[in-house]
Image: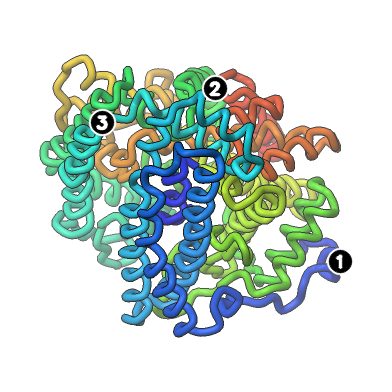
Amino acid sequence: MRKALVGLVVTLLATSSFVTAEAQTDAAQKAPVVWDLTELYPTDSVWDAESKAVAAALPGLVAYKGTLGKDPASLAKALRAVSDLQRRLARLETYASLKRDEDTRVAANQERLQRLQLLATDFGRATAFINPEIVSIGQTKIDQFIAADPDLKVFAFGLHDILRKAPHTLGEEGEGVLAGSTTATAAPQTIYTLLANSDLPWPTVALSDGRQVRIDSQGYTGTRDLPNRDDRKKVFEAFFGKWTEYKSSIGASLDGNVEGTIFNAKARHYPTALSYAIAEHNIPDQVYRTLVDEANKGLPTLHRYFALRKKMLGLPDLRYYDMYVPLVKSDRKYTVDEAEAMTLTAVAPLGQDYVDMLKAGFAKSWMHALPQPGKKSGAYMNPSAYDVHPYVLANFTGNYDSVTTIAHEWGHAMHSVLANKAQPFETADYPIFLAEIASTNNEMLLQDNLIANAKTKEDKLFFLNQAIETIRTTFFRQTMFAEFELKAHEAAEKGEALSGDSLTKIYLDLLKRYHGDAQGTVKIDDLYGVEWAYIPHFYTDFYVYQYATCLSAAAYFSHGIEGGDTKQRDTYLNVLKSGGSDYPYDILKKAGLDMASPAPYQAIVARMNMLLDQMEKLTNG
């Protein structure tokens, strides 16, 4: 969801039949399906002129070097100049990236974004003096400046964050060495990407329907849910068999990535790679470790689902290649208007103000909704244009997943709307640790509304299974990934060698434990221990755990909100309005949710048990 420039900017300052008739009436019919970028810049030439103006202003920032500690007014003047350029750059980035993504075939769109990326790099160079200079000024003097000048209030959190990182900030020579090592430490991911997407000779398998399918990553995800079990087995064996052939090379690549993270952690004086990786937003290690512990305590619930899956599929045993087969199918198709109406109905527990803001967003040209030739695949929300509004990209095809994508991405959009309204530019942006709460909460509200209002047993089973699959894949599977990362890094920190074989052993042990192999719940063949080689997220260290924590937090909040607890609803909305005004862990803790405690993870396991209760009742009836 987040764009690279936004992260750079913040870092530099540290800074249907299921739709009610009323909802159908209220929802904007024939909703806009193409975004209006003229709200950002009327024409390409206006964007071009603004980019040149920002470029011309960058050299002026160097004049502030050496002045930050002079007096409060000097510090405020320098930070305001930097912030104002950040704001303009973020708007330029929004236009350039959205133009590129609406048609990636247009060379001018590619070139515009490349120009913007170079401009962002120049901005980084022009402001590189800020953090070291603030650190040299020191906590006492900075606090005195903030107390003396009201204009510094909006910069207070960013300034304190820079000072928090002072013990991990090296001298000029040391920082130069680390900066120069970036290319080397990024090499493992580059190597992996080339191997996975270009160089591996993917096999072709013959399916029972006569098709010959190339089983690369796209072929695998497109065929792993085939109804014919023998076909699924062929696909899994071909796909993971190929990864096995290259596990030594890919193991060396992942080992290089792990060692690079450990090198940076030691260089910056962090006790572990985990501490280093999650320090950017001041997340306590205990959040990560409690997540892993509680997911393991919740495994009996996951195994309960697998037992139900086996029963509903009518299989004599359950194998890893049976994980993606839909238990209930739905061929129902929806329109964008219906998806929006369904979402409006579902989010009603968040209050009329939220519904009205969402309805207003739907009625405007904020979203590029439909697939078209050359358009970027997938979906995201771009929040970077603080002075305009968020933009949403979707590729709506009319299936159920398309509907949930609308609810999800517009959850992100409303998060930005609320944060931008409540916060100044300097503290409006928020990290992933908070971002996915808003989106997954909207998804849960949609799921529960559809379950409650399903007209047939088959519809209800379908919606229940979709909700359970969200928990399986986003909570349990992502936590399994997180535990694998932790074990791999800890092994390397103890001096143990990481190889394709040792990584496969670590992963296979986890795969068997999470799927109940010892209990006979799911039989995990040793071949699938190589799945770690398929997961590109492992090259962005300690990142995926946030999907599990956010889903858990959403379950915690949604339970009270759906129960009519207006205090809980208002607390949740205040979390969204907080933007990036504090560290995300602290924002949630002030809202009564300690992500280092078992409570949020127990909430998501309780939700899965509640959904399973309903599903089992229907299948036993």
Q: Secondary structure at mark 3?
A: loop
What is the three-letter code of the residue carrying label 3? Gly
Q: Position of residue 20 (x, y in %)?
A: 84, 62
What is the three-letter code of the residue carrying label 2? Gly
Judging by the rendered image, the residue that carries numbered circle 2 is 298
Q: Is residue 233 above or below residue 492?
A: below
Q: Alpha carbon of mark 3 to alpha carbon of mark 2: how far?
A: 46 Å
Is residue 317 something one can see in this rendering?
Answer: no
Q: Secondary structure at mark 1?
A: helix
Q: Alpha carbon of mark 3 to alpha carbon of mark 1: how far?
A: 65 Å
At 48% across and 33% down in the image, what residue appears? 161
Precedes in sequence: disc 3 or disc 1? 1
At 79% across and 33% down in the image, what residue appears? 568
Towards the viewer: 133 or 46: 133
Q: Position of residue 14 (x, y in %)?
A: 46, 40
Question: Splitting the image into 4 quarters, where does residue 597 fall?
Answer: top right
Question: Splitting the image into 4 quarters, where does residue 485 fall?
Answer: top left
**Nearer the observer, disc 3 or disc 2?**
3
Judging by the rendered image, the residue that carries numbered circle 3 is 171
Is residue 441 something one can see in this rendering?
Answer: yes
At 36% across and 60% down in the image, what residue appears? 120
Q: Is residue 15 above or below residue 367?
A: above
**Nearer the observer, disc 3 or disc 1?**
3
Towards the viewer: 265 or 138: 138
| Disc marking residue 21 | 1
Q: Alpha carbon of mark 2 to alpha carbon of mark 1: how far?
A: 40 Å
Q: Position of residue 417 (x, y in %)?
A: 67, 56
Precedes in sequence: disc 2 or disc 1? 1
